[in-house]
Image (cartoon, rainbow, N blue to C red):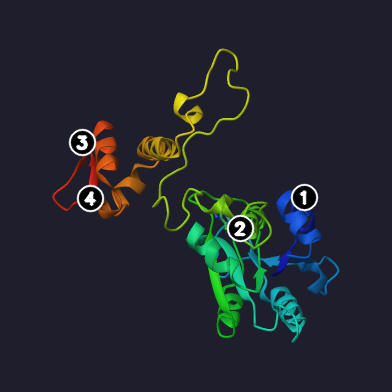
């Protein structure tokens, strides 16, 4: 997979040289190219921003450097490479659609992604419109809080996507039961995990994990997942498909103080 990032802070993307993503690059699974937006300015001060039309606080990123940068990056697509199709343009913005595991899975299947993290109040709207005519453009937010720029969201999204690529995680099964993995655990958070030693500071580990009884272990893990999800993300329980719950799941939820409404959905009891 090829990834391009255009930014005024190339050094902010240094973590892409480290750990999982760094190793994927070293092994040739990922081709990451970080570009300095100021390369495509032509004035003495390398100006990338200006005051907003209509007034108001903050600054807006000028369209011309973005246009020249994106035209040049797009023109480097090699007809024989993974970049033979035009890229998906991922525009990080707090006003975008939520970045979810589902979107990570969708983007992990694309051969080429171009990210345009912005600073200030964002990029002149005409840039997004210009490329939306030619490319699949996704405006994406990583959560309900405001960051100073899109660089940290790019690091977040690239890590979420890279770990899904074949051959990046040691064990292909490691993301099968991720919290939020589509299918399997049906939107339950993962429960607690333990390793050696069997006793630490007087604390043992749940007996069932030592039993070697795979059925009982799987059941216990699912119960823990329900308990954690009900406590930390009740919205996920309320949204879940009631048909996906077996008799034991329903008993677990009732034990946690949940009740099934007339619509079949689960709600915390009053
Ligand atoms: Cl993608 N950008 C900024 N600046 N803030 C955010 C965000 C993105 N997602 C959540 N907050």
Q: Quadrant of the C terminus?
A: top left
- Crowding at mark 2 (Cα within 10 Å: few <14, some 14-19, many 20+): many
Residue 269 is labelled as 3
Measure the C-alpha gap from mark 3 to mark 4: 12 Å
Q: Nearer the viewer, residue 252 or 5?
A: 252
| Circles 1, 4 touching at the beta carbon (< 8 Å) | no
Q: Quadrant of residue 92?
A: bottom right
Q: Quadrant of residue 108?
A: bottom right
Query: Where residue 210 sits: x, y (%)?
Result: 51, 28
The residue sitting at the top extreme is 202
Query: Which mark is first along the chain, 4 or 2?
Result: 2
- Residue carrying label 1: 18
The residue sitting at the right extreme is 44
The residue sitting at the front extreme is 212
- Crowding at mark 4 (Cα within 10 Å: few <14, some 14-19, many 20+): some
Along the horizontal axis of the image, is 211 left or right of 93? left
Residue 123 against residue 68 in the figure, above or below? above
Q: Nearer the viewer, residue 191 or 69?
A: 191
Query: Where residue 194 sits: x, y (%)?
Result: 56, 30
The residue sitting at the left extreme is 262
- Residue carrying label 2: 157
Query: Where residue 40 sits: x, y (%)?
Result: 79, 74
- Residue carrying label 4: 265
Disc 3 element: loop
Residue drawn at the location 66% of the way across and 67% of the way down: 116
Residue drawn at the location 54% of the way across and 50% of the way down: 146
Query: Which mark is first along the chain, 4 or 1?
Result: 1
Along the horizontal axis of the image, is 72 left or right of 229? right
Measure the C-alpha gap from mark 2 to mark 1: 15 Å
Disc 1 element: loop
Q: Quadrant of the N terminus?
A: bottom right
């Amino acid at each position: 997979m090829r990834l391009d990032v255009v930014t005024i802070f190339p050094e902010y993307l240094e973590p892409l040289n480290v750990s999982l993503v760094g190793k994927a690059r070293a092994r040739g699974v990922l081709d990451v190219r970080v570009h300095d937006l100021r390369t495509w300015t032509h004035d003495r001060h390398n100006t990338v921003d200006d005051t907003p039309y209509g007034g108001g606080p903050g600054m807006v990123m000028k369209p011309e450097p973005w246009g020249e940068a994106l035209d040049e990056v797009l023109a480097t697509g090699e007809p024989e490479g993974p970049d033979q199709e035009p890229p998906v343009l991922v525009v990080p913005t707090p006003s975008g659609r939520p970045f979810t595991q589902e979107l990570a899975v969708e983007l992990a299947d694309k051969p080429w992604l171009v990210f345009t993290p912005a600073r200030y109040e964002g990029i002149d709207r005409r840039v997004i419109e210009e490329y939306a005519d030619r490319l699949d453009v996704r405006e994406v937010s990583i959560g309900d809080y405001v960051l100073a720029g899109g660089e940290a969201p790019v690091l977040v999204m690239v890590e979420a996507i890279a770990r899904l690529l074949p051959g990046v995680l040691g064990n292909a099964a490691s993301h099968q039961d991720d919290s939020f993995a589509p299918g399997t655990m049906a939107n339950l958070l993962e429960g607690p995990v333990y390793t050696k030693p069997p006793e630490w500071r007087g604390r043992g580990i749940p007996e069932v994990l030592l039993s070697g009884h795979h059925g009982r272990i799987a059941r216990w893990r699912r119960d823990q997942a329900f308990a954690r999800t009900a406590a930390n993300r009740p919205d996920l329980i309320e949204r879940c498909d009631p048909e996906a719950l077996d008799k034991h799941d329903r008993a677990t939820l009732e034990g946690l103080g949940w009740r099934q409404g007339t619509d079949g959905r689960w709600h915390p009891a009053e």
